Image (cartoon, rainbow, N blue to C red):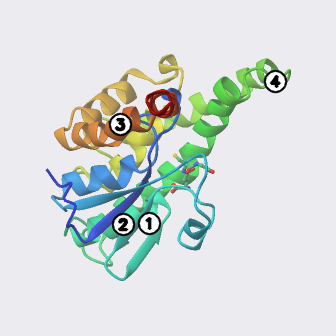
Amino acid sequence: MPIDPEAEIEITAYEWVPSFAQGQVRDLRPRWACEEYALPYRVRLVSAVERPAWYYEEQPWGQVPFVRDGDVGVFESGATLIHLAEKGGALPPVGSQERAKVLSWLLAAFNSVEPFVMEFVNCMVFSRKEDWAPLRRPSLATALEGRLKRLETALGDGEWLAGEFSIADIAMVTVLRAIPDPALLTAGLSAYVARGTARPAFQRALEDQIAPFAEHDPRKQKAKAENTAKEGA
Ligand SMILES: N[C@@H](CCC(=O)N[C@@H](CS)C(=O)NCC(=O)O)C(=O)O
């Protein structure tokens, strides 16, 4: 179990997020990599609601994840994956075709698929009540379906994107499982996501992300404060 309060690697995560985001927060990516590569890590929780001012010095937008590894600080989940895979000896040698394939698919997940997914999520979830949302949805769904079809073709009969399981799969599976309408995923991609999320390392990362949310739920905090106030009265 890589969570270890004494570990050198520290992952910053949110102490609580609303239920629709639970299990989807991007610190899942470095957590999953640490689990895959048996790299012990500790967690630093920050509030998503009131992000501390000092945190912007580490992550320019105050987002998670941020990974500290001794003297090295890394932001952007893709960069954290590269750092951790390197540390775990899980990246093919510099200059090899194998490494180029892993990095190409890693960046493809974040640059060529995730923007389509996020725009779709925005339309379906965050902005669903806007007048423009129902008008925008069909063309977004068509564009996303086009991307996914090509992705399925590229994956072909392969189990993983770059031969062996790699950080490219951590990237792509976490991007694909954020799609709010599972019907958009092709059968092949559904099976790919199921393969990825069945990995014990993913399951542990997911459990550990969710674990602190109950304790930090604002409703629970409020009830606690009210009880304390009552007891003191
Ligand atoms: N491109 C960044 C995106 C990070 C990101 O959007 N993190 C979300 C949580 S999943 C966040 O912190 N959102 C709050 C905000 O943007 O203020 C990465 O991959 O690390």
- Judge: label 1 CB < 8 Å from ligand 1: yes
Which of pointers 3 and 2 indicates the residue nearer the eye?
3
Badge nearest the viewer, 2 or 4: 4
Q: Residue furthest bottom?
A: 71
Element type where label 3 sits in the image:
helix
Identify the disc placed on residue 210. 3
Spatial CA distance of label 2 from label 4 is 38 Å
Residue drawn at (53%, 71%), measured in percent from left and top?
Answer: 58
Q: Is residue 47 visible?
A: yes
Mark earlier in primary sequence (1, 4): 1
Task: Specify whether 45 is left or right of 98.
Answer: right
Q: Amino acid at mark 1?
A: Ala
Which mark is in front, 4 or 3? 3
Name the element at disc 1.
Answer: helix
Q: Which residue is mark 4?
A: 130
- Pick whichever of labels 4 and 3 is earlier in the sequence: 4
Give the residue at mark 2: 82
Q: Residue at x 37, y 71 (%)?
A: 68
Give the labeled residue for mark 1. Answer: 79
The percent coordinates of residue 211 (x first, y second) are 31, 37
Please report contact status of discs 2 and 1: CB closer than 8 Å, yes or no.
yes
Disc 1 or 3, which lies upstream in sequence? 1
Kindly indicate whether the residue at mark 3 contacts the one at mark 4 (C-beta within 8 angstroms): no
Q: Position of residue 2 (x, y in %)?
A: 17, 55
Mark 2 crowdedness (10 Å alpha carbons): few <14, some 14-19, many ≥20? many
Is 77 left, or right, of 63 in this rendering? left
Q: Nearer the viewer, residue 206 or 216?
A: 216
